[in-house]
Each structure stands twice: as C-alpha cells, then as structure tokens.
Amino acid sequence: MHETAEATVSPKSEEELKELASLARLVAYARENARELNAEFSAYCLDLALGALLQDLDRSGVSLSQANG
C-alpha cells in the first residue's frame, strides 16, 4: 500500500511547497512545546507528522532551508 501512495504523488507547485514547509515549521514548534510540557505521546505523534512532512518535501527536492528563501 505504501508503494501505491508513492506512485500517485503528483508534482507540487511552488506555492504548495511553501505551504508544506510552513506546516512543517508549525509542527516542529508544536512538537517542541509538547516536549517542554512533558506531553510525551503528543510529542511522539507530532514527531511522526513532522517526519512525514519532511519526507514529502524531500521527495519534491526541497529542504526547509530552501523553502525559507
């Protein structure tokens, strides 16, 4: 099933990539706050979400530092 999801990924526009990068920064911020509050399960879930977002960006050939510029 994972292979099917990867096969159907369509190219993203520059605006969509900027939105993904913004979402990744937001999730990273929320994850750090959850860690500070000792909300371990929430931090874990946010860590998974951040990993997925970074993977989406990586597949599109974009890193967060590139998206910031």
Image (spheres, rainbow, N blue to C red):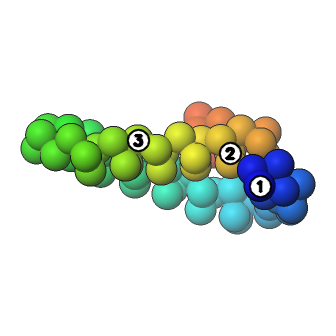
**Can you tell which of label 2 and label 1 is closer to the viewer?**
1
Q: Disc 2 marks which amino acid?
A: Leu
**Mark 3 lies on residue:** 47
Crowd class of label 2 (few under 14; some 14 to 19; many from 20; radius 10 Å): many
**x and y percentages locating residue 31 in the rendered image:** 31, 45
Q: Disc 3 marks which amino acid?
A: Asp
**x and y percentages locating residue 33 in the rendered image:** 20, 45
**x and y percentages locating residue 46 in the rendered image:** 37, 49
Q: Earlier in the sequence, mark 2 or mark 3?
A: 3
Q: How many marks?
A: 3
- Residue 15 occupies quadrant: bottom right
Q: CA distance from mark 2 to mark 1?
A: 20 Å
16 on left or right of 42: right
**Residue at figure coordinates x 33%, y 42% from the top left:** 44
**Can you tell which of label 2 and label 3 is closer to the viewer?**
3
Q: Earlier in the sequence, mark 1 or mark 3?
A: 1
**Residue at figure coordinates x 59%, y 41% from the top left:** 54
Crowd class of label 1 (few under 14; some 14 to 19; many from 20; radius 10 Å): few
**x and y percentages locating residue 51 in the rendered image:** 53, 40
Mark 1 in CB contact with mark 3 (< 8 angstroms): no
Disc marking residue 57: 2
Q: CA distance from mark 1 to mark 3?
A: 22 Å
Q: CA distance from mark 2 to mark 3?
A: 15 Å
58 on left or right of 25: right
Q: Can the viewer see residue 32 in this picture?
A: yes
**Mark 1 lies on residue:** 1
46 or 20, which is in the foreground? 46
- Residue 11 occupies quadrant: bottom right
Q: Earlier in the sequence, mark 2 or mark 1?
A: 1
Q: Disc 1 marks which amino acid?
A: Met
Numbered disc 2: secondary structure: helix
**Residue at figure coordinates x 37%, y 49% from the top left:** 45
